[in-house]
Image: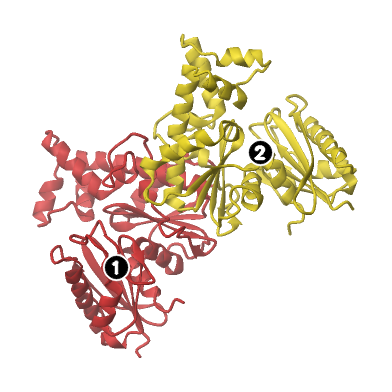
Chain colours: A red, B yellow
């Protein structure tokens, strides 16, 4: 045995893997796009390849890894290793035994958990949440995910806790991709912002967002494209990010009013890409809604950045 | 020693006391209006009188009580027994050592805690939450308070958790008595509903609410007045309660999306007075906002009714 653990962050656009030594140090990493055709089987095969790449970088074989942790979107049954329908993964329409499939291919133990929860646990164990015992993680990306650490332990509720993106910030407001009205994600999720940008473009608003997208050979407005457009002071990008920040401020403040946590960590593609200045703006947007305004929680950017999910997944290995 | 404990629920309009035996059975109870003049000292004196009344009902002297628990509004320092400024109590503008004052007058140990938290602990220990290990209590009265039990224990955060009334249900919406915009309480709190009813009356809307208030010799629209007006199908009362229920539905569903608790208990003056049919309507209003709609939490009316706060306060006695 190498003593090394593997970690996989399975996202809608990318698969990020790491290998991690016994001191929690990342010794290898790799990243590949998530397959958009071929369904769960193709995704599982690409996970194996991406993990082997990270393992090779650390000069080990996958079978010599102590185990592999996987953070997956959607509803995850940690016991059976089954991922139920995962909205952010294409052609993943039915439950798929991702854990057992990967175990067979990698010849080592595989542990699954929800990607957002894994991300917050990584920040709690090794990142921006280390010094706190209660923590709200907000993952601002395609959607807006949330994770909770309360009293030093993950709070999962009946398995589906943390859906901060689907807290209502405007009753009867914008339609969310989940079908409901007025969710925070309907204003702040990157997918919702892109849909609105496309609609406003059609209606004649001017924006460089899609020009930048084409220049960078993308088909989606990924976080880096928003960052570039903001740098150029593109008015539509500025307006949509302002709107997102207001929704995040109200939603996160609501969560803090309910839970009074010590700290909030903002991660996710947009959170880490836009970084501290925008997290500062979210903090300012929370202010007017905080019930105990004179004692706000500590707010910071996720410290582990893009690797947080994979690092947190690796930490799943060795859990009882 | 009698083995009996005293419990005090200090509210904005009434002081409710109980005496409770070792088997948690209520053996005496009394209720008096909360003094509106004379400040904290007058309130403390009235608490003593109301408690003696309940103690006499149980045939004991206050000094023979094992101890007395007090659920108080506002920010409470349980260690020192000091109640900071309490918005719902008149002339309570500075911190007041309620605990030590009562100890001196009653000649027994006095334990203080926040009234809403005490209410939810009572429902958890002896009421509608008994069979669950995670619980959200919503106290629908003058304001909208909340209390949390997570993993079988009260969750207080840094001391101010549970402010569900100040979760934002409509960003930029109605002005709340706390000064913020769009809080759930700004739509659902009885004080906010009364303010709106008075405004709409001035603007020419017709309602029997204030006629009922005068008939019953009141100066405020207490819960019973709303209940009577609803029974008479008073259109303004119906419209304002509908609006409150929509806000409660969105706010409580948001909290459930974040925490995925097993159960929600609705108490408070309006909650217990309007009872099951209206709790059913709150449940229906939550539906469209629940992220895991097929597995909603159990929702019920607070089982201990008006005595819940005082019973929960009595349970504080004997705590480490």
Q: Nearer the viewer, residue B302 or B144?
A: B302
Please tell me which residue lies in front, A183 or A78.
Answer: A78
Please state the chain letter of the residue tagged with numbered disc 2 in the rendered image: B
Q: For residue B33, what is the image quadrant?
A: top right
* Label 2, residues with CA under 10 Å away: few <14, some 14-19, many ≥20: many
The structure residue drawn at horizontal position 30% and vertical position 39%, both measured from the top left corner, is: A243
Q: How many marks?
A: 2
Q: Do tag 2 and tag 1 residues touch (Cβ < 8 Å)?
A: no
- At 13% from the left and 44% from the top, the residue drawn is A208
Which residue does the numbered mark 2 point to in the structure image? B73
SS assignment at label 2:
loop
Secondary element type, mark 1: strand
Instruction: Report which quarter residue B271 is drawn in.
Output: top right
Q: Is residue B158 above or below residue B31?
A: below
Q: Can see residue A296?
A: no
Please name the residue that numbered disc 1 is placed on.
Answer: A9
Percent position of residue A220, x then y: 16, 53
Chain assignment, label 1: A
């Amino acid at each position: 045995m190498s003593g090394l653990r593997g970690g996989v962050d399975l996202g809608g656009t990318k698969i990020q893997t790491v290998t991690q030594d016994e001191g929690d140090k990342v010794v290898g990493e790799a990243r590949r796009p998530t397959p958009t055709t071929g369904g769960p089987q193709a995704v599982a095969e690409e996970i194996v390849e991406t993990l082997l790449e990270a393992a090779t970088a650390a000069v080990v074989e996958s079978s010599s890894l102590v185990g592999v942790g996987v953070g997956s979107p959607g509803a995850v049954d940690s016991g059976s290793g089954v991922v139920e329908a995962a909205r952010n993964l294409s052609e993943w329409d039915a439950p798929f035994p991702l854990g057992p499939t990967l175990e067979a291919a990698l010849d080592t133990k595989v542990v699954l958990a929800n990607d957002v929860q894994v991300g917050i646990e990584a920040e709690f164990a090794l990142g921006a949440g280390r010094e706190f015992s209660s923590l709200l993680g907000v993952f601002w990306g395609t959607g807006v995910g949330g994770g909770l650490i309360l009293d030093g332990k993950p709070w999962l509720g009946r398995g589906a806790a943390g859906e901060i993106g689907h807290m209502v910030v405007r009753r009867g407001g914008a339609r969310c991709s989940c079908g409901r009205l007025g969710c925070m994600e309907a204003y702040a999720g990157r997918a919702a912002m892109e849909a609105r940008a496309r609609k406003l473009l059609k209606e004649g608003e001017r924006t460089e967002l899609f020009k930048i997208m084409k220049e960078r050979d993308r088909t989606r407005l990924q976080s880096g494209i928003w960052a570039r457009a903001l740098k150029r002071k593109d008015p539509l990008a500025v307006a949509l990010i302002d709107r997102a920040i207001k929704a995040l401020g109200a939603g996160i403040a609501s969560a803090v009013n309910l839970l009074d946590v010590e700290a909030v960590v903002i991660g996710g593609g947009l959170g880490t890409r836009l970084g501290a200045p925008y997290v500062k703006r979210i903090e300012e947007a929370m202010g007017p809604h905080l019930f105990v305004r004179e004692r706000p929680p500590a707010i910071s950017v996720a410290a582990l950045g893009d690797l947080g999910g994979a690092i947190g997944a690796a930490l799943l290995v060795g859990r009882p």
